[in-house]
Image (tube, rainbow, N blue to C red):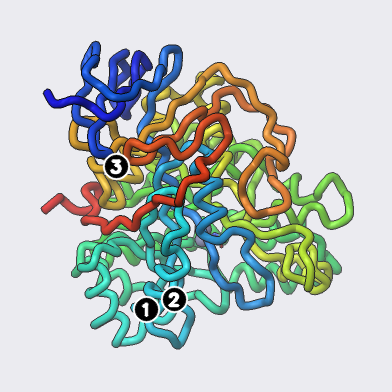
C-alpha cells in the first residue's frame, strides 16, 4: 500500500449501516484505506473520541437567487457555502431557477458564473422549471439532464412559478423519458390565494397569518395531486419540505401502492411551530419565521419524528433560503410592503449551518433516531437519490474524502454572532444543542476547524451527477 497523504486516526467511523473504530487513509483526496492502524502517512489528524461521518450533503439550499419584489437573498455562493462548511457539510445542492420567458440553458450558465471560484463546498445544481415551453421540454431539459443536471423542481404555488396540471404532467413525462427526478413544492395555489384574501378582508395581516393561509390542507391536497400525476406518468417524485402528518399520509398511501414517492423534511418542522410566527408579539419579529410550507404545531412535530424514524422520510435538508430581517432600501423581510400584509413577506429562513446540529441533538442525543439513520438522512440518502453515490455520501475505499469530525458531547447555544451565513438573524437563536461538527474535510483538505473556515482559496467544485439510483435502477 502506497503512503497516505493524510490519516484520520482512531475515531468511530459511522455510515448509514455501520459503526466501528478504525483509521481512514487518504491519498489525492480519495479514501484509499480503512483499517485498524495506518502508519505509512505524511499527516495525521487525531479523531480519538470523535465520530467520523461522511460530510453532510444538504440537498436543498437557495443561494443568490434573484427575487421578483426587490428583496434580496442574504447569501451568495461564497457566504452560503462557507456557512455550509461551518455546519459540517461538504456538498450542497442549490437551485438554478428559470425565470419565465428565459432559456433554461442560459439560466444554468448564469448560476455557474455566480458560483465560479466562490464555493467552499462542492456544489451541484437542481433546475427549477417555471416555463415549460415546447423548446424547454423538447430540447433544453433533455440535453441538460444528459449533461448531469439530473433533478428538477416544479412549483404548485407562487404566481410567477406555478405550473398548471397539464404543465406538471408534461414535465413529469420528460422526467420519465430522461430518467430524471422531479422535486415538487406541493402547496395548492388557489387554496392559498383564497385563504389569503379571506384573512386580509378580516384584517388579519400579521406574519402569523401566513401559517393560516398556507394550511396543511392545501399542502395535503397538492401532495395528493402531485402523487396522482406521478402515478399517471409512471415517474418517481420527491415531495420536498413536508411539514406534517397530512401530507405524510398521502406519501405513505402512495408507497403502499408501490409507487416511488420520496420525502424530505427540514429543521423548521421539528424545531419551530406556527406560534413562532407571532414573534413573541414583538414588532414584526414573526416575519423571521415565515417560510413555506410554514412550521405547524407540536402534533405535526411528533408526526415528523415518526416519519424520520420509520423511513417515511428519506431526506433531511435545510431548505436554506436566507433573507435579511433588517436591510437597507426595503430589501429585507422587515420592509414597508411586507408590514401591510403577510403575503409580501419573503418566504424562507436560513438554516444550512444549523441543520446537522439540530437533527443530531433533537434526534440522536435525545434517543429518537440512531446515528446511522442520522447519516442516512443527511448524507447517504441525498447522495443516492440525487446521483452522487458512492463518490459522495459514504466512507468507503474510492469515495471522495469528504469527512466531518463530530463531537457528540459538545453543547453549543446557537447564536447569530457565531454563524457564518449572510442573514442578520437565525430562527434558532438561543437553542441549546448537544453534538457539533468540529472539523470539515473536503476531498482530503480541511475546510473548517473549530468554527474557523479555512481562509485558503475556495476549492469547491461543480459535480456532474448521474441518475438517481433509488428512483431508477443504475445504468
Ligand atoms: N420553497 C422553497 O423550497 N424554499 C423557500 C421558499 C419556498 O417556497
Ligand atoms: Zn419549495
Ligand atoms: Zn426551498
Residue in the image at 57% along x and 28% along y: 362
For the residues marked 1 and 2, what is the alpha-carbon distance in whole angstroms? Answer: 6 Å
Specify which label sits upstream in the sequence, 3 or 2: 2
Say whether residue 114 is left or right of residue 414: left
Q: Position of residue 356 (x, y in %)?
A: 51, 35
CB under 8 Å between discs 3 and 2: no
Q: Which mark is residue 98?
A: 2
Residue drawn 31% across the image and 45% down it: 383
Residue 5 image offset from top left, x and y in percent: 27, 30
Q: Nearer the viewer, residue 309 or 39?
A: 39
Q: Who comes first in sequence, dot 1 or dot 3? A: 1
Question: How far across and how far down the image is residue 392, in percent?
Answer: 29, 42
How far apart marks 3 and 2 lie (CA) works out to 27 Å
Picture residue at 35% right of the left edge, 33% below the top: 54
SS assignment at label 2: loop
Local crowd at mark 1 within 10 Å, few (<14), some, or many (≥20)? many
Is residue 412 positioned above or below 256 on the image?
above
Report helix, strand or loop for mark 3. loop
Between 412 and 59, the residue placed more toward the observer is 412
> Which residue lies under the disc numbered 1?
104
Amino acid at each position: 500500500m502506497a503512503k497516505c497523504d493524510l490519516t484520520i486516526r482512531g475515531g468511530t467511523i459511522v455510515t448509514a449501516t455501520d459503526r466501528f473504530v478504525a483509521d481512514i487513509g487518504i491519498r489525492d483526496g480519495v479514501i484509499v484505506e480503512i483499517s485498524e492502524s495506518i502508519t505509512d502517512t505524511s499527516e495525521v489528524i487525531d479523531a480519538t473520541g470523535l465520530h467520523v461521518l461522511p460530510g453532510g450533503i444538504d440537498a436543498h439550499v437557495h443561494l443568490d437567487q434573484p427575487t421578483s419584489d426587490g428583496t434580496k437573498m442574504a447569501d451568495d455562493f461564497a457566504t452560503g457555502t462557507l456557512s455550509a462548511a461551518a455546519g459540517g457539510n461538504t456538498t450542497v445542492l442549490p437551485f438554478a431557477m428559470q425565470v419565465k420567458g428565459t432559456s433554461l440553458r442560459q439560466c444554468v450558465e448564469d448560476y455557474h458564473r455566480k458560483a465560479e471560484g466562490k464555493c467552499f463546498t462542492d456544489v451541484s445544481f437542481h433546475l427549477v422549471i417555471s416555463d415549460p415551453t415546447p423548446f424547454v421540454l423538447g430540447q433544453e431539459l433533455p440535453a441538460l439532464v444528459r449533461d448531469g443536471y439530473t433533478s428538477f423542481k416544479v412549483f404548485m404555488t407562487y404566481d410567477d412559478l406555478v405550473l398548471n396540471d397539464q404543465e406538471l404532467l408534461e414535465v413529469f413525462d420528460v422526467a420519465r423519458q430522461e430518467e430524471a427526478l422531479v422535486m415538487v413544492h406541493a402547496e395548492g395555489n388557489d387554496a392559498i390565494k383564497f385563504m389569503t384574501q379571506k384573512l386580509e378582508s378580516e384584517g388579519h395581516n400579521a406574519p402569523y397569518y401566513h401559517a393560516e393561509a398556507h394550511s396543511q390542507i392545501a399542502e395535503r391536497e397538492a401532495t395528493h395531486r402531485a402523487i396522482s400525476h406521478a402515478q399517471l406518468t409512471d415517474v418517481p417524485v420527491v415531495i420536498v419540505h413536508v411539514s406534517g402528518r397530512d401530507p405524510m399520509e398521502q406519501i405513505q398511501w402512495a408507497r403502499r401502492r408501490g409507487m416511488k414517492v420520496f420525502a424530505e423534511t427540514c429543521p423548521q418542522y421539528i424545531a419551530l411551530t406556527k406560534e413562532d410566527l407571532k414573534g413573541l408579539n414583538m414588532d414584526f419579529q414573526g416575519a423571521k419565521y415565515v417560510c413555506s410550507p410554514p412550521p405547524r404545531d407540536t402534533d405535526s412535530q411528533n408526526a415528523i419524528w415518526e416519519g424520520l424514524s420509520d423511513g417515511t422520510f428519506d431526506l433531511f435538508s435545510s431548505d436554506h433560503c436566507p433573507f435579511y430581517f433588517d436591510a437597507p432600501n426595503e430589501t429585507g423581510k422587515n420592509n414597508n410592503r411586507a408590514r401591510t400584509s403577510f403575503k409580501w413577506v419573503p418566504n424562507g429562513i436560513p438554516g444550512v449551518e444549523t441543520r446537522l446540529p439540530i437533527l443530531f441533538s433533537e434526534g440522536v442525543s435525545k434517543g429518537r433516531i440512531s446515528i446511522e439513520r442520522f447519516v442516512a438522512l443527511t448524507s447517504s440518502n441525498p447522495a443516492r437519490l440525487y446521483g452522487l453515490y458512492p463518490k459522495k455520501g459514504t466512507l468507503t475505499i474510492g469515495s471522495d474524502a469528504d469527512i466531518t469530525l463530530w463531537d457528540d458531547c459538545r453543547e453549543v447555544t446557537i447564536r447569530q454572532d457565531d454563524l457564518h451565513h449572510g442573514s442578520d438573524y437565525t430562527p434558532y437563536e438561543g437553542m441549546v444543542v448537544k453534538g457539533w461538527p468540529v472539523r470539515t474535510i473536503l476531498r482530503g483538505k480541511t475546510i473548517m476547524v473549530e468554527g474557523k473556515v479555512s481562509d485558503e482559496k475556495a476549492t469547491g467544485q461543480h459535480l456532474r451527477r448521474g441518475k438517481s439510483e433509488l428512483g431508477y435502477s443504475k445504468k
